[in-house]
Amino acid sequence: MFQTRTREAIETQYQAAKAGYAALGVDTDAALDTLAATPISLHCWQGDDVRGFEVHEEAVGGGGIMATGNYPGPALTPAQLRADAEKAFSLIPGALRFNLHAIYAETGGKAVERDRLGPEHFQAWMAWSTSRGICLDFNPTFFAHPLANDGYTLSHPDPDVRAFWVRHAIACRRIAEAMGRNQKGPCYLNHWIPDGAKDQPIDRWSPRRHLLESLDAMMAADVDTAYCRDAVESKLFGIGSEDYVVGSHEFYLAYVMTHDPMLCLDMGHFHPTETIHDKISSVLTFQKELLLHVSRGIRWDSDHVVILNDDIRCLFQQIVRGKALERTHVALDFFDASINRIGAWVVGTRAAQKGILLALLEPTDLLADLESSGRAAAKLALLEELKTFPAGAVWDMFCLQQDVPVGTAWIDAMQDYDRDVIRRR
């Protein structure tokens, strides 16, 4: 249904676009090289609606995570999830990583508590990533567990509960270290907890003191940080924690300023009208690196599939303008169970990559010169004209170079897989 254009047509259109950008001092070939070298970490939990493969001895608990929708065919086994991810990889250009949660361990059908998880439970994932030539990232799972039922984990008032979650975090840090050694490069380990209160807690102080103690205990473990690169992720509110979140933006910002982990900024974890692009220059003025969770919130932290909207454009503009792309680690974080899950992965990843490309195609030096010389109207006019420049032709060349379907052609491949694989589960 969706036609594939000829190589000749794509190259012709690219050459015209290349000339237009060159007139503004932009090297499109260099932009494509940079984009090809900028990895994006796809999140495993889009493929199975954050279910994981944990074997339980008792009922699963809570923790404020919810995927909505009932589209058929979520991955039910590790093999299915890996196959679905590989299909998504085949439709996405550029360098990719894959991001796992602890509940995606493979334990041979045995129940293994989270504080007992080890690298051996992720050997199949590591072997797969090696065979695919991609790197893995990792996350402790502080939700969907009986010890998360009351909404507190690392900040829990019970020291035994806190100790369990600290042991889980340490186990995950060692798993991430093993992943890093296997791939001969860093594994980015992100710590997010659901801790908080639904309505007006009297004591907002003690949970934060407990969280600080827990974090310090976790980070004191003997783990090689050349391979395990820790990050901490804040949140404004969540399901069941609308009034108070222990790990707030201010808490973690202060923590990373005084401790080693990097900050993780999630695009959906702030006020519904608050964007994060203005935070980039503030954080990276003081920090060496930054982890991003690229998502899309609608009215609340709803983790909708990423699209090429103004939030994405502004985010990557700030990163590229600040020459901070190499210091910024880009990961996706959304989960939509109402649509084809491979399609969600591909739409979201390609949208993020297009955002990066648009920023790389911006004549930043020219725009900065217009601004510094007081020619504000000319700057604004150029920004507007750039919106209709032929960036699509440059993107199509990128897909052609990376040997993935160009333009709409990938949609047929997604629909074929949906018919032949997903609908038959």
Image (cartoon, rainbow, N blue to C red):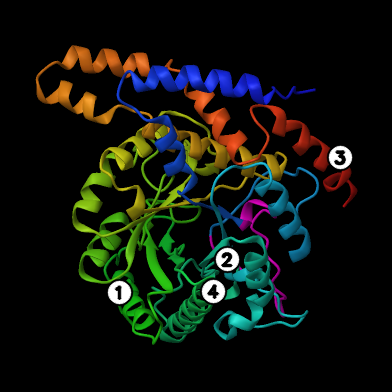
Mark 1 Cα shell of 10 Å, populated few (<14), some (14-19), many (≥20): some
Between marks 3 and 4, how big is the CA–CA gap?
34 Å
Mark 4 Cα shell of 10 Å, populated few (<14), some (14-19), many (≥20): many
Q: Which residue in the structure is indicated by mark 1?
A: 212
Given the current orientation, which residue lies at the most extreme left position?
A: 373
**x 78%, y 59%: residue:** 80
Marks 4 and 2: CB-CB under 8 Å? no
| Residue numbers of the magenta segment | 44-63
Which marked residue is nearer to the observer: mark 1 or mark 3?
A: 3
> In this rendering, would 59 be left or right of 183?
right
- Nearer-the-camera pick, 29 or 302: 29
Marks 2 and 3: CB-CB under 8 Å? no
**Numbered label attached to residue 419:** 3
Between marks 2 and 3, how big is the CA–CA gap?
28 Å
Q: Give the amino acid at mark 4.
A: Met
Counting from the top left corner in percent of width and height, residue 55 is at 72, 75
Label located before the other in sequence (4 or 2): 2
Can the viewer see residue 234? yes
Q: Which residue in the structure is indicated by mark 2?
A: 101
Above or below 73: residue 259: below
Dot 4: element: helix
Q: Which residue in the structure is indicated by mark 4?
A: 179
**Numbered label attached to residue 237:** none
- Nearer-the-camera pick, 113 or 173: 173
